[in-house]
Amino acid sequence: MARWTVRAIAEMPSVSNGDADDPAWYPLQHVLGIDTFGVNVFVANFAGQTLVGEHDERESGQQELYLVLEGEAIFELDEEKARLARGTALAITDPSVRRNARALSPGTALLIIGAGRSPFTSTWKASHFEDIPRPS
């Protein structure tokens, strides 16, 4: 097994179930051999395309991070809306939050990272973060 893998996203195979309404799905987790967290990129073919279907993560207990790499997306979070532009991150730390997202422009690329119930332990020193505020 490789100890590391380097691949351009555009050179990775995309997954499709054959539905023209589905965005391009690049399964980074699978292609790169990652098995401790989920990570995918979805790229919209057209404005208004669903990038994240409505769901919550109660069953899995996952927290999820969404990062807009290109374009803009509109998220619905428990019936509230959040508009995310390129370079904007959204962290959903409560697995019960119902969520979905649509692309506002073709080519909108959304990186999604999720991890489950085991708490993450950083290898960084706590002193690195003393002056960094956390959400309340």
Image (spheres, rainbow, N blue to C red):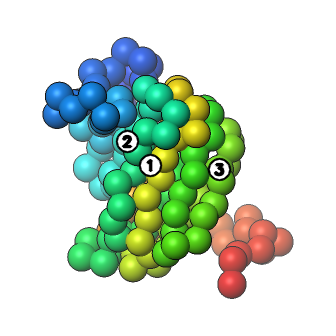
Which of 109/2 is in front? Answer: 109
Most extreme residue toward the right is 131
Q: Are marks 2 and 3 in contact (CB under 8 Å)?
A: no
The residue at which mark 3 appears reads as 84
Q: Residue at x 39, y 58 (%)?
A: 114
Q: Are marks 3 and 1 in contact (CB under 8 Å)?
A: no
At mark 3, the secondary structure is strand
Residue 86 shows in this picture: yes
Assess disc 2: are there few (<14), some (14-19) or many (≥20) residues with their C-alpha within 10 Å of its C-alpha: some
Assess disc 3: are there few (<14), some (14-19) or many (≥20) residues with their C-alpha within 10 Å of its C-alpha: many
Question: Mark 2 or 3 closer to N-term?
Answer: 2
Question: Mark 2 or 1 closer to N-term?
Answer: 2
Residue 50: give x, y in percent of width and height: 41, 45
Amino acid marked by disc 1: Ile
Which of 82/39 is in front? Answer: 82
The residue at which mark 1 appears reads as 112
At mark 1, the secondary structure is strand
Left or right of 136, for residue 105:
left
Residue 129 drawn above or below residue 21: below
Q: Are marks 2 and 1 in contact (CB under 8 Å)?
A: yes
Most extreme residue toward the front is 48
Left or right of 117, for residue 107:
right
- Quarter residue 118 falls in: bottom left
Question: Mark 3 or 1 closer to N-term?
Answer: 3
Residue 32 shows in this picture: no
Most extreme residue toward the bottom is 136
Quarter containing the N terminus: top left
At mark 2, the secondary structure is strand
Q: Give the Cα separation between the discs numbered 3 and 1.
A: 13 Å
Amino acid marked by disc 2: Asn
The residue at which mark 2 appears reads as 40
Residue 54: give x, y in percent of width and height: 36, 61
